[in-house]
Image (spheres, helix red, strand yellow):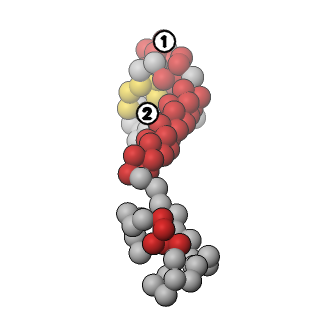
Amino acid sequence: MGCNESTERRRNNADGTENDGDLEICTSGTEMTAAGLAVAGAIIVACCVAGLLSGSEASSSRKTMKAPGRNYRIFRDDFEDDPADYFRRLRD
């Protein structure tokens, strides 16, 4: 029996006896859609909060550059402040 059949038919078997053991739980499409949207909204809010807390604004706004002679990135303003010091530290 499906969710669209009458309550009386679900309560009574074909022979007229009551069927207390078989209980169907039916939800409408609207309820399922609302629940799905609530879950999706909670996930979006959680992702936004995690993004805000993951890094500080100051460090993410600093420009980087490929380190000369190396395979990693450095902050551009640190290099531009004293390029000679950067190359001096490379020889250490």
Check the image and report above or below for 46 versus 19.
Answer: above
Q: Which corner quadrant holds the N terminus?
A: bottom left
Q: Which corner quadrant holds the C terminus?
A: top right
Residue flagged by tag 2: what amino acid is it?
A: Arg
In the image, 61 versus 13, the foreground residue is 13
Considering every residue shown, the one lying at the far bottom of the view is 15
Considering every residue shown, the one lying at the far top of the view is 81
Real-space Cα separation, disc 2 to disc 1, in angstroms: 16 Å
In the image, 45 versus 11, the foreground residue is 11
Residue 85 screen position, x and y as percent: 52, 20
Looking at the image, residue 55 sits to the left or right of residue 32; the answer is right
Given contact means CB atoms under 8 Å apart, are the residues at marks 2 and 1 in contact? no
Residue 58 screen position, x and y as percent: 54, 17
Residue visible at 52% across and 63% down? 25
Residue 14 screen position, x and y as percent: 45, 84
Check the image and report above or below for 76 versus 73.
Answer: above
Element under label 1? Answer: helix
Element under label 2? Answer: strand
In the image, 27 versus 9, the foreground residue is 9
Residue visible at 56% across and 30% down? 49
Residue 80 screen position, x and y as percent: 43, 14
Q: How crowded is mark 2: few (under 14 residues within 10 Å), some or many (20 or more)?
A: few
Task: Note whether residue 44 is visible.
Answer: yes
**What residue is pinned by disc 2?**
73
Task: Note whether residue 85 is visible.
Answer: no
Q: Residue 81 carries which label?
A: 1
Residue flagged by tag 1: what amino acid is it?
A: Asp
Nearest to the eye among marks 2 and 1: give it. Answer: 2
Considering every residue shown, the one lying at the far front of the view is 16
Considering every residue shown, the one lying at the far right of the view is 20
Residue visible at 46% across and 19% down? 62
Q: Which of marks 2 and 1 is nearer the N terminus?
A: 2
